[in-house]
Amino acid sequence: MQLLSNKASCNTHGQDSSYFLGWEEYEKNPYDEALNPKGIIQMGLAENQLSFDILESWLAKNQDVAGFKRDGKSIFRELALFQDYHGIPSFKKALVDFMAEIRGNKVTFDPNHIVLTAGSTSANETLMFCLAEQGDAVLLPTPYYPGFDRDLKWRTGVEIVPIQCTSANNFQITQSALQHAHEEAKKRNLRVKGVLVTNPSNPLGTTMSRNELNLLIDFIKVNKDMHLISDEIYSGTVFSSPKFISVMEILKERNYLKDSYSDTAQVWNRVHVIYSLSKDLGLPGFRVGAIYSNNDEVIAAATKMSSFGLVSSQTQYLLSAMLSDKKFTKYYLSENEKRLKRRQRMLISGLQKANISCLKSNAGLFCWVDMRHLLSSNTFEAEMELWKKIVYQVKLNISPGSSCHCVEPGWFRVCFANMTVDTLNLAMTRLTTFVADTNVANESKMSTRRTRSLPSWVFRLSSINYREQEER
């Protein structure tokens, strides 16, 4: 007799991915400067810990808010009692204004068109439930965030069809790759309900080009039963050019507005944005996510479904006050950008000392690192072999490209914003030593192979020459 339901016991959660297995190994042996200096350093977690002091400084100056008071009086009871799932209006207004500020106020967002969820995981899943049936498909460019196999597929039954992108053009989406994915879905008798992208990209750490965004909008314009979902949870982590362009900005440029003529209005209604405060503010534990859509039906459906993953009233109250402080948000975004840029440069510098390069990036909390030259062969088996050495011998948890469904073996996602400078320097020292030792070992093997491949007469000649030198 089966104790659990098929849904609970199925293996489509993705927890057997090397992405999650690396976390498990880290948790068994976590690095600590004092308590466990030889432990595994966590470089597989995209967390922004670089600007906590700014948040803590604001809390220290706004103790009434942190203590759930208004005008010196406690509002604990008000916050603790029932709140409906539409969210606190003041927080929704503060959140959409913050989203607009990140985008340089080139676009604005209507607080009546945002649905609050318990993080972006919940937002993505909720949107899948709203837009697709079990057995339908969404197209995703590779490489993509490994958690999407869980977030989009596990409970919804939706299939992911990859848009295969390669290093030949820095993993950008092309018309041919998009069309090929669509044709592949048709061959599998899958009804494609849309395209989902992360912009800026996780794991690439790059922003999407205007050409790519226009390509995607043109695609759903032609395919009138498809949606475009832009996961923009890293939009506030862009630290160098080119600047971030939201899909909403492209819609505005093309005059695809709600009140425009029917064809373009239909496109407007089929574009949706996912957002979260987990990366930009570094608050994953607060579980604040959101769905933004111009489609009234989607908003109504998502609002009903959001009752399974609400944001607490206490969290909304606190963050409403913080995000409404425009002096704070302006300083935070500016300073956080500078800190991310410095930290990314530190990682790149450390990698260069180990003769390792990475994809040129301008956003995110990680780099897409090229270790193809360290593979014993151009295979994913060799990639896993290298990954295991890095986890178990070097004691660094990084994410292999295969966990992100990259089509080329040898790429790895390496995070840089979830640790101290000293820890990052130690990680780079470990990696540099490993690469040097690997190169020496490879040279030794090559020398042995060359020696073994020499004909016997070479050894006899060498022996004769040696004896002649001795006799002289």
Image (cartoon, rainbow, N blue to C red):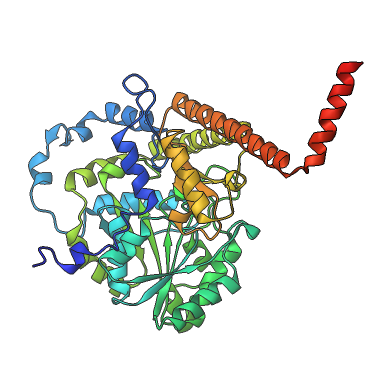
Residue 186: image x %, image y %? 45, 82
The number of numbered discs placed on residues in the rendered structure image is: 0
Task: Examine the image and state in which quarter residue 434 appears.
Answer: top right
* Residue at screen point 59% across, 62% down: 210
| Image quadrant in which the C terminus is located | top right
* Residue at screen point 53% across, 52% down: 244
153 left or right, relative to 263? left
Task: Examine the image and state in which quarter residue 461 appears.
Answer: top right
* Residue at screen point 46% across, 33% down: 394
* Residue at screen point 33% across, 51% down: 95
Image: 419 above or below 85: above
Q: Residue 260 or 431: which is nearer the viewer?
A: 431
Residue 355: image x %, image y %? 64, 36
Q: Residue 124 or 356: which is nearer the viewer?
A: 356
| Any part of residue 413 in sight | no
Image: 92 above or below 259: above
54 left or right, relative to 62? right
Q: Residue 382 or 122: which is nearer the viewer?
A: 382
443 left or right, relative to 37? right
Residue 377: image x %, image y %? 58, 52
| Image quadrant in which the N terminus is located | bottom left
| Any part of residue 99 in sight | yes
Residue 265: image x %, image y %? 44, 78
412 left or right, relative to 37? right
Q: What is the residue that sits farthest to the right in this orientation?
A: 472
Task: Examine the image and state in which quarter residue 253 appears.
Answer: bottom right
